[in-house]
Amino acid sequence: MLRLMTLLALLLTLAMPAAAQEGTDTSRAETGGAQTLEDILRRQEQQAIDDSFRSDLTGDPEQAAPITDQLGTRGGASDPDLWRAFRYSTADITTQERGPATKTLIQDGGMWWLMFREGPLLKMAAYLLGGTLLALALFYLIRGRIRIDGEKTGRTITRFKAFERFAHWLLASSFLILGLTGLISLIGRKVLIPVFGHDTFSFLATGSKWVHNNVSWAFIVALVIIFVVWVVHNIPDRTDLHWLSKAGGLLGGSHPPAKKFNAGQKLIFWAVIVLGGSISLSGISLLFPFEFNMFGHTFSTLNSWGVPSWIGMSDLPYPLQPHEEMQYAQLWHAIVSLVLTAIIFAHIYLGSVGMEGAFDAMGKGEVEEQWAREHHSIWADEVLKSKASKTEAQ
Amino acid sequence: MKAFLVSLVVLVVITIGANQILMRLGPSSAEATVSVDNVRLSD
């Protein structure tokens, strides 16, 4: 009997802490309405917590202490209530500053953004860009340079006119400069400061920012020109399906027919236009802070359509504080830029060391006739026929 | 090669031009967000 009682006492003792953690309301009542151990643990694990017990507790004039009592620094109102109101942007703030963000004194979401920006985002950048370079190096080692299979004719045909090449190089050079200066801004604090020190990085960061902000206009101009000049040649058609089914010649051993641009190049074109356009819009939003807020409206629309629930997510945050708009714009700008950079790495590889004769198209504008017949047979036939008919007419 | 060099020149022109235009257009963000109204000059 004594042993049984001892065992029962031991079980009850062990069960007590578990019972104490059951139900947030009970333990919150025990903390006088403040956060609980469970809240702290969930926050440390980056999990969402219901902090309405704090966000709703921002002062109620009806509940204020009567002025007949001993008063604090804010009279009958509570200091913690005021700080909570600052934190959740519900305080009635008057300021001589004029602007959408000037009344945000505490921005709670900033810590999430900072931690994501300095942690997962940098890892993603390293894996994505490093992984792409590694994959291309492996592809080169396995496949080698894609050579011109047939005998070279020694004759060339015009692939791109001077204006097309100018637009391409304007887009390419501005993109490379923006990519480099963007990376300096993105990885500077975590990677460059430890290596070069604060003074050198300060000079580098200031210069990078100026260059990034102003070169962006050249990128946008080039993007518009490229779209106008090449969109007609990049509309998908049936030849693209055949080209894709053969993986551009990697499967089956023969070169599938293609027009001026094959399906792979069309994918690159649309990636540049769509992702480049999105990068430009988020970039403009960042260039003119708080003037072009795009995320709050987008999140609200997606929530109203129920899009987050399609992938098992809860509603996207809305409304957003002005700083949050900028933080989402920065993350979007960086992530989409990284994805486009990885795609462009593949484009640069295939346009240079990866394929014999490809660089001539943008270098000189003239390509070897045999190269054109192999990689863009439909286009080559059209150009050669047109050339022949012009010669006959003369 | 000529197209590439021209693109570099145009890139520099757009970069400096955009900066100069934006600097002259105004108002700057400081001008747009600061007000001298409601400043308490004395007790």
Image: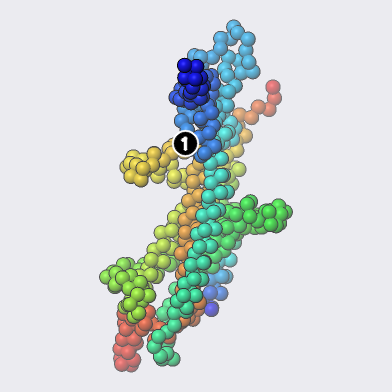
Q: Is residue A245 left or right of residue A288?
A: left
What residue appears at the point 43 percent right and 77 percent down from the top-left corner?
A: A160
Q: Which residue is mark 1?
A: A48
Mark 1 residue element: loop
Quadrant in which residue A384 is drawn: bottom left
Frontmost residue, A274 versus A387: A274
What residue appears at the point 64 percent right and 29 percent down from the top-left corner?
A: B39
Frontmost residue, A45 versus A279: A45
Q: Amino acid at mark 1?
A: Ala
Q: Is residue A389 left or right of residue A293?
A: left
Frontmost residue, A209 versus A100: A209
* Color scheme of the displayed model: rainbow
Q: State the image coordinates of residue A180 (x, y, percent, origin top left).
A: 58, 61
Q: State the image coordinates of residue A7 (x, y, percent, origin top left).
A: 49, 22
Q: Is residue A323 in view?
A: no
Q: State the image coordinates of residue A314 (x, y, percent, origin top left).
A: 39, 39
What residue appears at the point 51 percent right and 39 percent down from the top-left corner?
A: A46
- The chain letter under disc 1 is A
Above/below status of A68 relative to A198: above
Above/below status of A81 relative to A112: above
Q: Quadrant of the C terminus of chain A?
A: bottom left
Tag count: 1
Q: State the image coordinates of residue A200 (x, y, percent, origin top left).
A: 71, 56
What residue appears at the point 53 percent right and 78 percent down from the top-left corner?
A: B2
